[in-house]
Image (cartoon, rainbow, N blue to C red):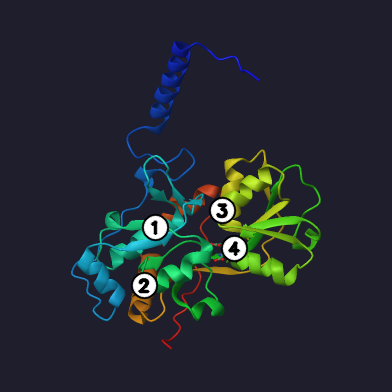
Amino acid sequence: MRRHSAPRTVRALVLLLFAALAAAACGKEGSPPTKGPAAGKLPHYAVAQGFQLPDSSTWKRAKSRGYFTVGAKEDQPYLGEKDPATGTYSGFDIEIAKMMSASLGFDPGTIRFKTIASANRETALQNGQIDYYVGTYTINDNRKKLVGFAGPYYMAGQGLLVRTDENDIHGPQDLDGKRVCSAAGSTPYQRIQQDYPKATLVAYDTYSVCVDNLLTYQVDAVTTDDAILIGYAAKVPKELKVVGKPFSQEPYGIGVPRADNALRFALNDALAAREKNGDWKKAYDATLGLSGVPAPQPPAIDRYPAS
Ligand code: GLU
């Protein structure tokens, strides 16, 4: 079938108009998307001067190259989001990554972020692709066998995202026979598999692909941490809603190479200091706090010994 198309000049003018409108809406170069954190409102983190961590091989390697390589997510609103136009990452996890870099003596502006999916975090830390990882990464004993964790810096809980026209799903007990999407290698995926075996699980690399599948009626629900789901629902509140109460505890940690206890201990100290001096709360308010949930008390830091 042939579609009628406007004459070329008219189309060109319309495109120009859109470009002008988009530029006006964006403001100066590098502005994040409208609903994301405003760059001007983000806190600045004092960079530790003369900081040394000679016992950490990760820190020494970063020192010789001049910056940290940090693993993160790029499609999780309010937490870790990459602006496709500028390549800039923003969100609460990104702020945590920045304040940690500053505490370890590196200007946060020098960080090179690398998007790493849930299923690839352990390998990325093990093979030195990244120095540390900040991206909704739940601390648990299984993962502690493979990597180290500083923190936790935030406590999330597993939840469910459905379409607003869905009336049958109110909690995980309603998932029997339903198609439920989550990210491969994630704790929410594992929990549904173990505790709700009558649900039909669908796995993708990322939650944003799950959300696309939900919007197009390929799946009935998306499950992961409430903090992540709230961000997707906020983007299209007419289409999506978070239902029920959180049904797990997901303490978010900063992933580090397992053998690098010196780095883990330094990050725990850095986190404690940033919670105390108000930077943690400022970072929360400027990012995840925009979802409407007021800043909680940060969870107690788990300073488990080297093994
Ligand atoms: N916090 C959960 C996990 O680490 C879900 C979020 C994610 O996949 O990053 O598996």
- Residue at the location (43% across, 88% down)? 307
Sequence order check: which comes first, mark 1 or mark 4?
1
Res 188 quadrant in image: bottom right
Q: CA distance from mark 2 to mark 3?
A: 26 Å
Q: Nearer the viewer, mark 3 or mark 4?
A: 4
Sequence order check: which comes first, mark 2 or mark 1?
1
Q: Nearer the viewer, residue 121 or 241?
A: 121
Residue located beneath label 4 in the image? 184
Please determine whether, in this image, residue 205 is positioned above or below residue 61: above
168 to the left or right of 247: right
For label 2, the SS is helix
What is the count of numbered marks? Answer: 4
What amino acid is labelled 3 in the image? Val
Sequence order check: which comes first, mark 3 or mark 4?
4
What amino acid is labelled 1 in the image? Lys
Residue located beneath label 2 in the image? 267
Q: Residue furthest front?
A: 1
Q: CA distance from mark 1 to mark 4?
A: 18 Å
Q: CA distance from mark 1 to mark 3?
A: 28 Å
Q: Nearer the viewer, mark 4 or mark 2?
A: 4
For label 3, the SS is loop
Residue located beneath label 3 in the image? 293
Q: Do callouts 2 and 1 mark residues in contact (Cβ within 8 Å)?
A: no
Residue located beneath label 1 in the image? 114
Q: CA distance from mark 3 to mark 4?
A: 27 Å
Q: Residue 253 in the image: state x and y as whole percent.
A: 47, 69
Sequence order check: which comes first, mark 4 or mark 2?
4
Look at the image and tell me whether residue 278 can be seen: no
